[in-house]
Image: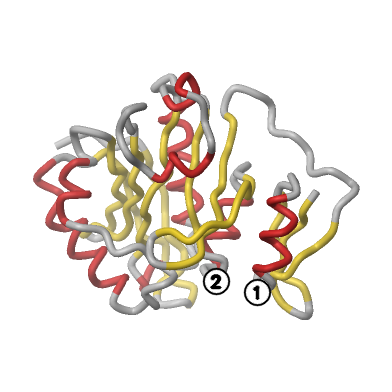
Amino acid sequence: MNSAVIEGRLGRRDTAPCEPVAFEGRWLDADDVPAVIELHHDVREAVAADLLCRETDRFFIDHVGRCGRILGLFAEDRLIAYGVLGFPSPNEESFADGFGLTVAERASVATIDGTSVAPKWRGNGLQKLLIAERLKEARAAGCWIAVSTVAPGNLPSLHNLLSSAMTVRALRHVFGGLRFLVRCDLDVPIPAPPLEGRWIATTDTDSAAAALDAGAIGWTFEEAADGSRIWYG
């Protein structure tokens, strides 16, 4: 078993405050894959198919060895969350293909891939923690571009990605539905959002696609009085 790389305490259970519960995170190995698959199935059954990619068992098996790593979080002797980190070969098909990267850029890409958090432990910031740790691991592995995808209607994931220095670069039909393609450059300081731009509602995918196709970037997520929106500039 791999040693812990994260430790902390959970302050919410079943959407309500609770007595602190210790958790730890570690990089998983092949023996952990059945628990990952079980959690993935539990979470995806409660989510619309167009919001969450349905991964195969082989995907998880490959990502604890051949082409990536999986970070798992444990509490009360159970896996409560995981986040997949991919290291695709430059010649291997992956969702990184949609970003228009050069061959040299593909050689330094990491994918911030699927994440699941058990419903009873949501509200503890675990998805954002998993994003941060995978970005850190990608940088340590010599990867300088991190990419991910998220459905416009998956507001928690969209919020967490955009608050983790990732930005929207395109909108495409992949994984059975519309997905924002998001990217973070790990070798440069995090840029500030431009002052000139406009807010576009997350539900207004036509306007978002037009702005992105014209060269804008989606920078910041916000929950406004009339709904969620992204700042494009």
Q: Position of residue 41 (x, y in %)?
A: 23, 69
Residue farthest along the left direction in this orientation: 31
Q: Taking 13 as reference, is 193 above or below it?
A: above
Residue ID at (44%, 70%): 51
Q: Taking 131 as reference, is 17 above or below it?
A: below
Which residue lies under the disc numbered 1?
203
Which residue lies under the disc numbered 2?
153
Left or right: 191, with 22 as reference point: right
Left or right: 211, with 154 as reference point: right
Residue ID at (48%, 36%): 135
Q: Which image quadrant is residue 202 in?
A: bottom right
Tags 1 and 2 touching, CB below 8 Å: yes
Q: Amino acid at mark 2?
A: Gly
Q: Position of residue 215 (x, y in %)?
A: 74, 44
Please give the label number shown on residue 60: none
Q: Amino acid at mark 1?
A: Thr
Residue farthest along the right direction in this orientation: 196
Residue ID at (84%, 59%): 198
Q: Nearer the viewer, residue 11 or 196?
A: 196
